[in-house]
Image (spheres, coloured by chain):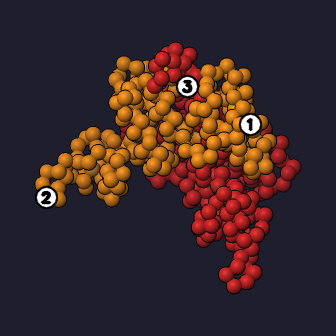
Chain colours: A orange, B red
């Protein structure tokens, strides 16, 4: 198909399509003549995935590129679910403080988790604790044990999905992890807002902001 | 303090500070002379908050502006925690399908939640289901009941924090919700990656991608 049809089918503008090609997120189409390029179904599928990561998952284009590169790497077959998932975390410019890393490590140990203290997950979590501290809001870290319990419930469901797709080949496994991780964060955020509203009604008798 | 000192103290460049002022996220400093502007502690505190939302929380500047505007609105005192929290969700350009909304509503009803079917939380969650469908991955929605249980655990901890800060005045309550919601999503994402790694080791005997 031509770029105009690809744009119509995917819901992504021709300008954005060209930009994704130039940034390396989308493979180029096939040149079939002067000023004429053909795109196939694989371009459409890839664009739907990019659109999901960026528009619904809220990833920057740079973060989406990292995630797709990890998923595409033939040196990382199914096995590297974790590396792919973790490529979607925001990049940390300063390493977190040793105190915050230890605080997360304590919670993880109490959950009985196996982990290393320099992984992307613990680094991202410890960076949040450092920001709470910089904002004078160390009290917000009181949620940590509950969040860790919730993360374990989510991770068990995530690994159920990965396990069910073990036989579907590396491309499907990689897509499962990319989509499940990034859109899973967005799904969880939406459900968290619903649960907060419900919990507000339960405790205060009304949805805050709508005090009737 | 001058803008150079404000930049040094906050870790935000002078160019970004000027941009945040022009975009309305940060109030302007006080003009004290020709080409000279003074900033105070309140500018520093606000910049730390903006930096947390954008760099650690992963919000776009437009989303951070919405969140801060909701928190600043005097017509929304403490009560509107929910509106503030929900302003941080990605903006949905197309309404989700009725099928996806009903699917989320079914799960919420099974959890016993009070909710309306047009709230931002259910809209965000249903949009994720629509993207799963567009990608041919309806199977990923099997995680929904577990995610809802996890969201409830998180929301109870969130409301504990709000309840503890009830007497601290509307500004603190608003900050609690802004910081707790946006950075809470980031904290949960980091812990989720740690829990996924642990669950992988438990099931497969190794961290995927490191098959030793």
Element type at marker 2? loop
| Labels 3, 1: front one | 1
Name the residue at 48% across, 17% down.
B212
Q: Are marks 1 and 2 on the same chain?
A: yes
Q: What is the CA distance from the residue labelled 1 to the residue labelled 2?
A: 61 Å
Q: Position of residue B173 (x, y in %)?
A: 78, 51
Q: Which of the chains bears the disc numbered 1?
A: A
Would residue A116 be found to the left or right of residue B79 on screen?
Answer: left
Label 2 packing within 10 angstroms: few (<14), some (14-19), many (20+): few
Question: Which residue in the rendered view is the most extreme toward the left?
Answer: A33
Q: For residue A34, which numbered disc appears in the image?
A: 2
User: Callout 1: 10 Å neighbours few (<14), some, many (20+)?
Assistant: few
Circle 3 residue: B197
Residue B77 seen anywhere in this rendered image of the structure: yes
Q: Are marks 2 and 3 on the same chain?
A: no
For mark 1, give the secondary structure: helix
| Residue at point 78%, 63% (across, down) | B41
Label 2 to label 3, Cα distance in Å? 50 Å
Instruction: Please give the residue where the numbered disc 1 appears in the rendered image.
Output: A99
């Amino acid at each position: 198909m031509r770029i105009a049809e690809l744009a119509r089918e995917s819901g992504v503008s021709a300008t954005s399509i060209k930009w994704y090609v130039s940034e390396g997120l989308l493979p180029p189409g096939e040149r079939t003549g002067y000023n004429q390029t053909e795109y196939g179904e694989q371009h459409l599928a890839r664009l739907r995935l990019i659109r999901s990561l960026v528009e619904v998952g809220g990833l920057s284009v740079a973060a989406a590129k990292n995630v797709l590169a990890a998923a595409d790497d033939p040196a990382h077959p199914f096995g590297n679910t974790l590396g792919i998932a973790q490529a979607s975390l925001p990049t940390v410019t300063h390493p977190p403080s040793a105190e915050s890393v230890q605080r997360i490590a304590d919670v993880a140990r109490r959950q009985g988790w196996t982990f290393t203290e320099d992984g992307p997950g613990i680094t991202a979590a410890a960076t949040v604790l450092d920001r709470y501290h910089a904002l004078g809001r160390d009290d917000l870290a009181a949620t940590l044990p509950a969040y860790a319990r919730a993360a374990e419930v989510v991770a068990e469901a995530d690994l159920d999905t990965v396990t069910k797709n073990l036989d579907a080949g590396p491309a499907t496994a990689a897509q499962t992890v990319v989509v499940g991780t990034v859109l899973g964060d967005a799904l969880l955020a939406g459900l968290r807002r619903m649960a907060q509203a419900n919990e507000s009604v339960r405790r205060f008798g009304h949805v805050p902001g709508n005090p009737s």
